Image: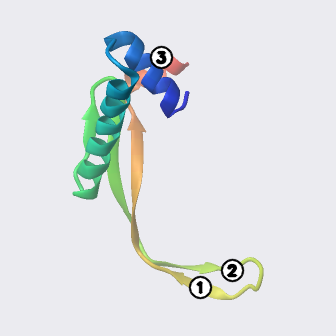
Amino acid sequence: MNKQALVEWVHGKLGGTKVQAEEIVDGLFEAIVNTLKKGDEVSVAGFGIFSVKQRAARMARNPKTGESVKVAATRVPKFRAAKALKDAVK
């Protein structure tokens, strides 16, 4: 399922126009991204938790040249699936 299929599903459930359904889907994604940017987490009961993880600086190796390269610390998004989602997928 991609974003357009998700918009179609929302449109089928709520009615209205496809433009309104797309605004709902975009708004949901925007709310999740903005919350993660602030460093907070988004918890959806029965689905999972979106959070931000701090990845420490480290030394890596360029596989082509063998040269050591310093990789800066960064923040990355993380998702932990809820037990209900894990059980549903089994």
- Given residues 4 and 48, the one toward you in this image is 4
* Residue 83: % across, % down: 39, 25
**Dots 2, 1 in contact, CB < 8 A:** yes
**Going from the N terminus, do you reach mark 3 or mark 2 first?**
2
Which is more toward the observer, 9 or 21? Answer: 21
Percent across and percent down for residue 33 are 32, 49
Could you tell me which quadrant the N terminus lies in?
A: top right
At a point 36% along the width and 11% down the height, the residue shown is 13
Assign a secondary structure to mark 3.
Answer: helix
The x and y percentages for residue 87 are 47, 19
Residue position for label 1: 69
Residue at the location (40% across, 49% down)?
A: 78
The number of numbered discs placed on residues in the rendered structure image is 3
Label 3, on which residue?
88
Residue at the outermost right position: 64
Quadrant of the rendering where the C terminus is positioned: top right
**Amino acid type at mark 1:** Val
**Three-letter amino acid code of the residue under disc 2:** Asn
Picture disc at residue 62: 2
Q: Residues within 10 Å of mark 3 (few under 14, many from 20)?
A: few
Q: CA distance from mark 3 to mark 1?
A: 42 Å
Element type where label 2 sits in the image? loop
Marks 2 and 1, how far apart at CA? 7 Å
Say what amino acid the circle numbered 3 marks: Ala
